[in-house]
Image (cartoon, helix red, strand yellow):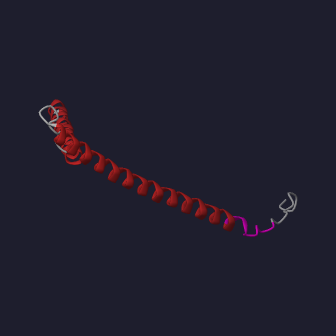
Amino acid sequence: LRMLLRKMAAEELKKEQERKAEERKKIIAERVGAPKPLDSANEATLQAICKEYHDRLVKLEGQKYDIEYIVRQKDYEINELTIQVNDLRGKFVKPALKKVSKFDKL
C-alpha cells in the first residue's frame, strides 16, 4: 500500500512538472512570438523585421519605465505611512508606574 501511494505521488508530481513546463512554453511563445525567418529574407524584409523588433522594444521599455515609476511611488507611500505610524506611537503618554514596597505584603 505504501509503495502504491509513493508511486501515485511520483506520477502526480511528474504530471504537475510536465503541465508547468507546457504552460511555461506556451507563455513564452505568446510573449516572444514565433522566430522570424532571417536566412531567406532579402534586405527590405530584414529592415521590416528590425523595425518591428525595435518598435516592440520601445513599447516594452515604456511599459517597464511606467511600472518602475509606480513601484517607486508605492515605496515612497509605504515609507511615509511607516513614518506616520511611528510618529503616532511616540505621542502616547506612558502611564506612571506605581511603586510597591516589597515589605508591605508580608
Give the extent of the magenta segment.
89-96
Looking at the magenta stretch, what is its main secondary structure?
loop
Between residue 37 and residue 15, name the one nearer to us: 37
User: Which residue corresponds to the image point at 72% horizontal and 65% vertical from the top-left?
Assistant: 90
Counting every numbered tag in the picture gives 0
Give the answer, above or below, for where 66 lies relative to 4. Answer: below
The image quarter containing residue 28 is top left
Task: From the viewer's side, name the closer residue of 76 and 84.
Answer: 76
Does residue 24 sit above or below 60 in this rendering? above
User: Residue 24: in sight, yes or no?
Assistant: no
In the image: residue 87, left or right of residue 39:
right
Horizontal and vertical percent for residue 75? 53, 57
Where residue 43 sits, quadrant-wise, is top left
Left or right, 85 with reference to 11: right
Query: Where residue 79 sits in the image (x, y, percent)?
Result: 59, 59
User: Quadrant location of the C terminus?
Assistant: bottom right
**Residue at 32% from the left image edge and 47% from the top image edge:** 57
Q: Residue at x 77, y 69 (%)?
A: 95
Which image quarter holds the N terminus? top left
Q: Is residue 17 above or below residue 58?
A: above
User: Quick check: is 95 in the magenta stretch?
Assistant: yes
Residue 87 visible in this rendered orientation of the protein: yes
Residue 104 x, y percent position in the rendering: 87, 62
| Image quadrant in which you'd find residue 22 | top left
Does 5 lie within the magenta span? no
